[in-house]
Amino acid sequence: MCGILGVVATSPVNQLLYDGLQVLQHRGQDAAGIATSEGGRFHMHKGSGLVRDVFRTRNMRNLTGNWGIGHVRYPTAGSAYNAAEAQPFYVNSPFGLLLAHNGNLTNADELKREMYLSDLRHINTSSDSEVLLNVLAHELQAASKGLKLDEDAIFTAVAGVHRRCRGAYAVVAMIAGYGLLAFRDPYGIRPLVIGRNDTAAGSEWLVASESVALDVLGFRLLRDVAPGEAVLVDIEGRFHSRQCAAKTVHAPCMFEFVYLARPDSIIDGVSVYESRMKMGEFLADKMKRTMPKVHIDVVIPIPDSSRPSAMQMAHRLGLPFREGFVKNRYIGRTFIMPGQATRKKSVRQKLNTIHQEFKGKSVLLVDDSIVRGTTSKEIVNMAREAGATQVYLASAAPPVRYANVYGIDMPTRGELIASDRNDEEICREIGADGLIYQDLDDLKASVRALNPALSFFETSCFDGSYITGDITAEYLNGVENQRSEPAAGKGDAGDHGDDGEGGEGGQLDLNLASAGDH
């Protein structure tokens, strides 16, 4: 999971991009980067850490120009953290390109071989985003036949990317001297929205991973980029779009609604906040059916993304809703903390109980999902230590049993608490008096109720069904083997979000007037 942003404006965009990335910071805390363009020159600065740590005043002054892109990075499954893989990525042939990517290519290794053997391009990092950049560059060269680039050639090149690339990808790219290109994979797995702002000097355009970035920057949400669609905004501010995929299936990632996206975002026509409220309603109805004799005194959310579900669940059950945990917002998300021991310790650093809300009560704790179970076990213990007589746990999502290969760094199956346990065994493992999971059909209904046009969803981490149809047991074993290596995976790389690290990153000015061969 990463956050991407692209802007074509009538005035300097460096502050717009910085502010937009801060709003998208929840989508990645490992690295951040911004690239802008003025005349025939690209300006870029990127580095490891939070947006606020990567960019200094001197960096921002150098990011001149009225159009640009930004990225916050959260490494995907099996990728080791490497400062050199901060985005955007740049290539100078054939036209000068900068690209930022959210997602994960599932055929990256195959594409790397093609790059080397037939495309004659060199891949310098292990990032699939650099592979995607070079595929786009090669397709642009082929579509333009080495001559002047035009709109048709650009859209033809994106069609070529769709034919060659598999997996999930939402992309923003800068084409030197031409404009901003954005496109989404034919399944629409990762989100991408379009915004517009009309000024006296002309129209401004913005594409972003989530609509919340548009809200904060003063842009009006127009629509989502459709699966397989490409949009092009030239440097004069003219907007073009075209469907570039031969076949599309709209199947957005369900985990965006469960956990990843901010609640104030609208994705694929669905309010994330309202979808989480619906999840609470369905879960309350299931609890009435399956646990009618369980006595609950109070419903307490596990901050933060479970709060809408817990609130609506309490309302549906006719029970008091209380805040029982206080969150320290200066601690990194435990979902991406390194190692089980560190993760266990971090729960106590991150959450503290309000004892009077637990003492002598039977409590229902509501979480958005249960992944490893380590956090859940610690929180159940904390509730008991605070005086709860009984502790029940509800998950607004179904059991997470399978790896995610589309841009979310899920643990290996061996680390997933639900991979080889039934509900009763999980309940015993985390030490709760009772456990209830959302049904997958109800989870889908929670989102579909807000946009009936959504027929399919990417739900592989729950049901093991990979929407792109190209995921084999060998591929999954390869991902797990990569994660098990000492340096592999974000679980080992750690969370660079709130530990004060970051540093200066790298500043790069690229004069494209004399770009050479790649």
Image (cartoon, rainbow, N blue to C red):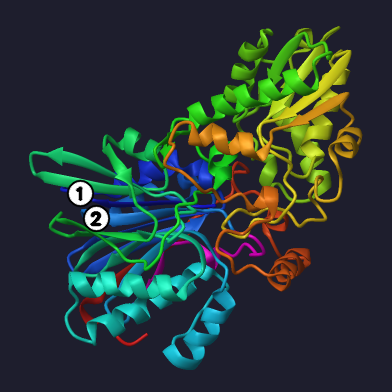
Q: Quadrant of residue 48?
A: bottom right
Q: Which residue is mark 1?
A: 9
Q: Is residue 252 above or below residue 476?
A: above
Identify which residue, 283 or 17, lies in the foreground. 283
Characterize the local packing of mark 2: few (<14), some (14-19) or many (20 or more) Cα atoms within 10 angstroms: many
Per the image, is 438 magenta? no
Q: Which residues are magenta?
A: 76-91
Res. 459 in view: yes
Q: Residue at x 77, y 29 (%)?
A: 436
- Looking at the rendering, in which quadrant would you find the C terminus? bottom left
The amino acid type found where label 1 is placed reads: Ala
Residues under numbered marks 2 and 1 in contact, where contact means CB atoms less than 8 Å apart: yes
Q: CA distance from mark 2 to mark 1?
A: 6 Å
Q: Residue at x 36, y 81 (%)?
A: 138
Res. 120 in view: no
Q: Residue at x 69, y 33 (%)?
A: 438
Q: Quadrant of residue 271?
A: top left
Characterize the local packing of mark 1: few (<14), some (14-19) or many (20 or more) Cα atoms within 10 angstroms: many
- Classify mark 2: helix, strand or loop: strand
> Residue 78: percent from the left, percent from the top?
67, 64
Q: Residue at x 64, y 54 (%)?
A: 409
Q: Is residue 448 left or right of residue 212?
A: right
Q: Is residue 473 above or below residue 182?
A: below
Sooner in the amino-acid sequence: mark 2 or mark 1: 1
Q: Which residue is mark 2?
A: 67
> Residue 68: percent from the left, percent from the top?
29, 56
The amino acid type found where label 2 is placed reads: Trp
- Classify mark 1: helix, strand or loop: loop
